[in-house]
Image (spheres, grey):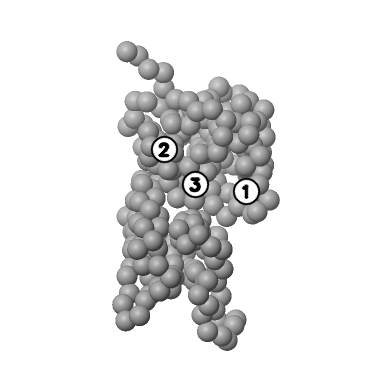
Amino acid sequence: MFKMKTKILLSGCNGKMGRAITALVKEREDCEIAAGVDLVSTGNEGYPVFSSAADVTVPVDVVVDFSHPSLLEPLLAFGRKTKTPLVLCTTGYSKEQTQAVHEASKEIPVFSSGNMSLGINLLMELAKRAVQVLGDGFDVEIVEMHHNQKIDAPSGTALMLADAVSEAKQEEMHYMYDRHSQRKKREKNEIGIHSVRGGTIVGEHEVIFAGHHEVIKLSHSAQSKEVFAAGAVNAAVFLSRQKPGLYNMSDLLKE
């Protein structure tokens, strides 16, 4: 039976992740890049490129965004106006922007995740399980490492992991980003989050459970941006047939 391809509008199409998604989609039969959004066009993308979402004239089924937090407002406006689902893969949103995403999800399907990797989402579940097994006798620290071009810190994934640990502990935890500014002992309700930036590191995350005379570490290392590209494309195909609401990777994994 013939199935229609999901038509994707790729925001940030000429960035590193945009190029990875373009290459990946060329190998798939269930979707295609119908158009892109970027300030610069090489002319070799294989699809029309517009300078802003408001200028797009090509019909699309879903938007995939790997650009910059500053572009969130026009993308939400485009999604609401055209009733187009949005897959938001950009990190570094403010609290106000996060609230705007929640408001938009009341009108259109929105998929938002700080990390599109299947492995990272498994790491989150393992971290939750570790908290349940280890109890309150272990301090939790999170270390994330990325390339020297990454702007936001800590990474959205590190915050996702911290939120997962907090959820499992069933209490409000305090996120400590800057220990050197305080001279005091570590408090029990703290989760330390540490950022490393250097070289071409794609993305590494480690959750450390430090107890009495023993330490347990859970870690994930991304070897290529393709793992994030694949997750984003799978999310786009999934979201294109969903009702309005806010979705994340756990919803996709239930499919």
- The percent position of residue 94, horizontal first and vertical second, equals 64, 54
Crowding at dot 3, Cα within 10 Å, few <14 / some 14-19 / many 20+, comes out as many
Residue 71: mark in rendering: none
Find disc 3 in the rendering and name its residue: 113
Task: Identify the element where label 2 is drawn.
Answer: helix
Task: Name the amino acid, label 3.
Answer: Ser
Q: Residue at image x 55%, y 60%? A: 152
Q: Nearer the viewer, mark 2 or mark 3?
A: 2
What separation in Å lies between label 3 and label 1 (alpha carbons)? 11 Å
Q: Is residue 148 above or below residue 244?
A: below
Task: Name the amino acid, label 2.
Answer: Leu
Q: Is residue 154 above or below residue 124?
A: below
Find disc 2 in the rendering and name its residue: 252
- The percent position of residue 231, horizontal first and vertical second, equals 40, 41
Looking at marks 3 and 1 on the same chain, the residue that comes earlier in the sequence is marked by: 1
Crowding at dot 2, Cα within 10 Å, few <14 / some 14-19 / many 20+, comes out as some
Task: Name the amino acid, label 1.
Answer: Thr
Looking at marks 2 and 1 on the same chain, the residue that comes earlier in the sequence is marked by: 1
Task: Identify the element where label 3 is drawn.
Answer: loop
Q: Residue at image x 32%, y 13%? A: 1
What separation in Å lies between label 2 and label 3 (alpha carbons)? 11 Å
Which quadrant of the structure image shows residue 182?
Answer: bottom right
